[in-house]
Structures are given as structure tokens and as C-alpha cells.
Image (cartoon, rainbow, N blue to C red):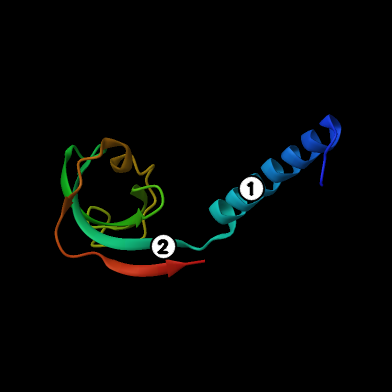
Amino acid sequence: MLTLTAIEATLLGLGLVATVALLIIGVCFAAPRTTRLADVSVECPLLRRRVAARLVWDEWALRFVDVARCSALDGYSEVICAKGCLARGTATPLSRPTTVAHA
């Protein structure tokens, strides 16, 4: 018959909890994140009007995380502003998003 002392049981329990925690943390940070590029219409806080933009949608966070292109900046050029349109949450889809895997 197998018997454990209180100290052995405590150490076994802590080891199990630590192993599960490390596995969960490893999956959260080491797993590849899937993002989608979505053509949307957003309210630009700088121009105070709606503009077309290509935003990056993060499937893990379930929100837009970056602005890839913006029509307000000389016809879909690189984005150099503070990207305040991400915080507003008023994006309206213009087309179906495409999946792009970023490592």
C-alpha cells in the first residue's frame, strides 16, 4: 500500500500545479497567433471623418490590434499616425477578412 506523508503530498500537489501552470503559460505565449487583415471603415480621430483602412484582427485577443494601411494617408500608404482609430471600436467591415499567419 502506498502512503504519503503530509510533506510528500504537499510537494506532489505543488509539482502538479506548477506543471499545469507551465503548460498553460507555454501555450499562451509560444503558440502561433493567427491574425486576419480586414478592410474596414473607421472613424479617424485626426481628420474627424470616416476613412477606409486595413486593420489587423487578432483571433486570440478578439480585437483589432494594428493598422496596416489607411486611405487617409495618401491612398493606402504606410501608417505613421498614433492609430487612435483602434481605441474607438467603430470599425465597419468593407469585405471578407483574409487569414494571414504571423509568427
Q: Position of residue 37 (x, y in %)?
A: 30, 63
How far across and down, in percent of the image, does residue 50 sit?
15, 45
Comparing 98 with 77, the one in front is 98
Q: Nearer the viewer, residue 61 or 20?
A: 20
Closest to the observer, 91 or 69: 91
* Figure quadrant of residue 89: top left
**Residue 31 shown left or right of residue 97 in the figure:** right
The image's mark for residue 11 is: none
Q: Earlier in the sequence, mark 2 or mark 1?
A: 1
Secondary structure beneath disc 2?
A: strand
Residue 60, compared with residue 36, is above or below; it is above
Q: Which amino acid, mark 2?
A: Thr
What residue is shown at x 26% (from left), y 38% (from top)?
Answer: 46
Nearest to viewer (mark 2 / mark 1):
1
| Residue at 38% in and 61% down | 35
Measure the C-alpha gap from mark 2 to mark 1: 24 Å
76 relative position to 66: left or right: left
Is residue 77 visible to us here?
no
Which percent across, then down, holds residue 15?
75, 43
The residue where tag 1 is placed is 20
Which type of secondary structure does the marked residue at label 1 adopt?
Answer: helix
Q: What residue is shown at x 64% (from left), y 47% (from top)? A: 20
Towards the viewer: 63 or 52: 63
Specify the amino acid type for callout 1: Val
Q: Compared with residue 102, is residue 86 higher up or lower down, i.e. above or below?
A: above
In the image, what residue occupies the spot 41% across and 62% down? 34
The answer, for residue 95, to whether it is visible in the render is: yes
Q: Is residue 44 above or below residue 58?
A: above
Q: Residues within 10 Å of mark 2 (few under 14, many from 20)?
A: some
Query: Which numbered dot is residue 34?
Result: 2
